Image: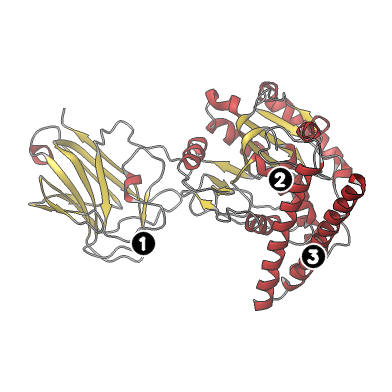
């Protein structure tokens, strides 16, 4: 009797799952067809939402079935280490031992693994060394035991992979032996059919094959890295990192006050995207399911919609910059540049005193580029939209101080024209009040210190005359003429009279 009841339950469960799977496949087909339309159709939105709901329900059912049908000991044995959720049977799970060509595996999980797929380009163009050297230079030696850079030889030409593998070992053997780097390669049977695929988005056959293979490449990396670390960062083989990329990532993770699925450290495509490693295998499975439907960055957005935490968060300034000009797709030039990237976020005047102060402005601020970033030790800068005559930014010191030197620099290497074209700097000893709306101070009896010259201001005194003749409470940089270009304040530095 119990056997018959169990059989009925098993059949009922699988009928439900089969119906859900059929619904999912049907809606996926409808979605891929409607995405070819050039104009947004209201029915497309309904179909997209139906697909999302189907995926959510299917994922929930599969996970619940996994947990109820198997004995606890067996489920625990088959659960990948470090995964925070029960895992259903996978067809895209990578055998990490078989895939690893070079590199010493870690005994314990680290903080971050960085995935870099690499393929050959036309005319033997190769950016990989630049990418790796940038990461090496900008990863403090004391932190490297918590980082694993995974270089995936993703070209279909095995001879090319073999040569590149030897070059990497010759150039980076010490980093491979220490576990800071690993070199991996997928077995051919991991790749599904890449010929005769759907030509969505009016793409050519060559482009469809290229982007579909790219999807599978990412799925392989996700699966390989699923247990290496707490977090996973996706890069490409033609990017450079900012000087303090690791600090920026740690700080951004720690400042998140709500649950998240993806954090972004570049505005471009699929560069600088960070995930929790516990999500990687499910993400790999999802991409393998729809690898021929659309590019990987599109699939990622749909994947995020399937999860409870649908919002992604963009860190500004960007921590990674795309440098490649020749794409891995034959004949394609890739002139993508991240306009929010700053090569070096190190303060130029790191010997300045910069006493505790609040920096504020009545100029419209662009996104997260707040005035305080130009003054504090935190990486970043102040970026404002086209300032108008009479607008200003202020430095309000906590305690008045005699100043021996003041420097304000605007513009940057990446944005050389975004300077304060016409402006003056003044100082005051008397704070009258503070505007509650924008925190800008109203100070009296300002003393004019001078004008900006080519976007830069500097005043120096070695005595108690002029700048050093009174205690400064407020500094005020005023725009004296409307300008069309934006204004980027890279650094504000002050020194006190000793």
| Residue wearing tag 2 | 125
Horizontally, residue 487 falls left or right of residue 13, namely: left
Which quadrant of the figure contains the C terminus? top left
Position of residue 384 relative to residue 39, above or below, is: above
Q: Verify CB contact (< 8 Å) between mark 1 and mark 2.
A: no
Q: How many marks?
A: 3
At mark 3, the secondary structure is: helix
Q: Position of residue 406 (x, y in %)?
A: 22, 41
Q: Residue at x 60, y 54 (%)?
A: 308
**Which residue lies under the disc numbered 3?**
23
Instruction: Provide residue 268's location: percent of width, then percent of height.
Output: 58, 54
The residue where tag 1 is placed is: 385
The furthest residue to the front = 1
Is residue 80 at least partly visible in the picture? yes
Cα separation between marks 3 and 1: 49 Å
Q: Is residue 88 in sight in this rendering?
A: no
Q: Secondary structure at mark 2?
A: loop
Mark 3 or mark 1: which is in front? 3
Mark 1 lies on a secondary structure that is loop
Pointer 3 or 1: first along the chain? 3
Pick the front one: 225 or 1: 1
Q: Residue at x 71, y 32 (%)?
A: 81
Viewer-closest of 419 and 293: 293
Q: Disc 1 and disc 2: Cα gap in Å?
A: 38 Å
Q: Is residue 266 left or right of residue 169?
A: left
Task: Write the residue at 26% across / 57% down.
Answer: 438
Q: Toward which corner of the image does residue 145 lie, by quadrant?
A: top right
> Which is closer to the viewer, label 1 or label 2?
1
Which residue: 88% across, 62% down?
A: 196
The answer to whether residue 190 is above or below residue 163 is below
């Amino acid at each position: 009797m119990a056997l018959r009841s169990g059989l009925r339950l098993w059949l009922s469960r699988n009928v439900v799952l089969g119906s859900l799977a059929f619904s999912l496949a049907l809606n996926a087909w409808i979605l891929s067809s409607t995405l070819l339309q050039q104009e947004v159709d209201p029915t497309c939105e309904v179909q997209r939402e139906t697909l999302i709901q189907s995926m959510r329900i299917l994922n929930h059912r599969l996970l619940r079935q996994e947990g109820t049908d198997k004995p606890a000991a067996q489920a625990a044995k088959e659960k990948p280490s470090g995964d925070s959720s029960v895992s259903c049977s996978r067809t895209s799970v990578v055998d990490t031992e078989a895939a690893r060509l070079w590199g010493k595996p870690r005994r314990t999980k680290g903080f971050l693994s960085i995935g870099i797929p690499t393929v050959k380009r036309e005319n033997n163009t190769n950016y990989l060394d630049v990418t790796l050297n940038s990461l090496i230079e900008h990863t403090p030696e004391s932190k490297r035991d918590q980082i694993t850079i995974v270089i995936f030889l993703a070209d279909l030409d095995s001879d090319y992979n073999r040569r590149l593998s030897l070059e990497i070992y010759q150039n980076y053997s010490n980093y491979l032996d220490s576990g800071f780097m690993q070199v991996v390669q997928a077995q051919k049977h991991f790749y599904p059919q890449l010929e005769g695929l759907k030509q969505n988005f009016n793409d050519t056959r060559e482009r469809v094959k290229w982007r579909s293979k790219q999807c599978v490449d990412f799925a392989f990396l996700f699966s390989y890295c699923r247990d290496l670390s707490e977090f996973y960062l996706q890069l490409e083989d033609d990017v450079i990192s900012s000087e303090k990329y690791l600090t920026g990532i740690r700080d951004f993770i720690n400042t998140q006050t709500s649950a998240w699925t993806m954090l972004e450290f570049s505005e471009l495509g699929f560069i600088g995207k960070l995930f929790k490693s516990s999500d990687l295998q499910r993400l790999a499975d999802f991409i393998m399911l729809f690898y021929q439907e659309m590019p990987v960055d599109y699939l990622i957005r749909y994947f995020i919609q399937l999860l409870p935490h649908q919002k992604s968060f963009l860190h500004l300034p960007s921590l990674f910059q795309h440098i490649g000009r020749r794409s891995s797709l034959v004949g394609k030039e890739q002139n993508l540049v991240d306009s929010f990237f700053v090569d070096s976020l190190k303060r130029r005047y790191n010997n300045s005193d910069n006493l505790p102060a609040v920096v504020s402005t009545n100029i419209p601020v662009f996104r997260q580029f707040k005035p305080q970033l130009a003054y504090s030790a935190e990486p970043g800068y102040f970026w404002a939209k086209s300032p108008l005559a009479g607008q200003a930014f202020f430095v309000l010191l906590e305690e008045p101080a005699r100043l021996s030197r003041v420097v304000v620099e605007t513009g940057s290497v990446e944005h050389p024209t975004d300077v304060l074209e016409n402006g003056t700097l003044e100082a005051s000893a008397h704070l009258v009040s503070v505007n509650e709306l924008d925190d800008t101070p109203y100070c009296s009896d300002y003393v004019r210190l001078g004008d900006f010259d080519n976007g830069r201001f500097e005043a120096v005194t070695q005595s108690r005359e002029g700048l050093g003749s009174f205690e400064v409470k407020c500094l005020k940089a005023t725009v004296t003429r409307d300008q069309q270009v934006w204004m980027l304040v890279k650094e504000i530095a002050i020194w006190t009279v000793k």
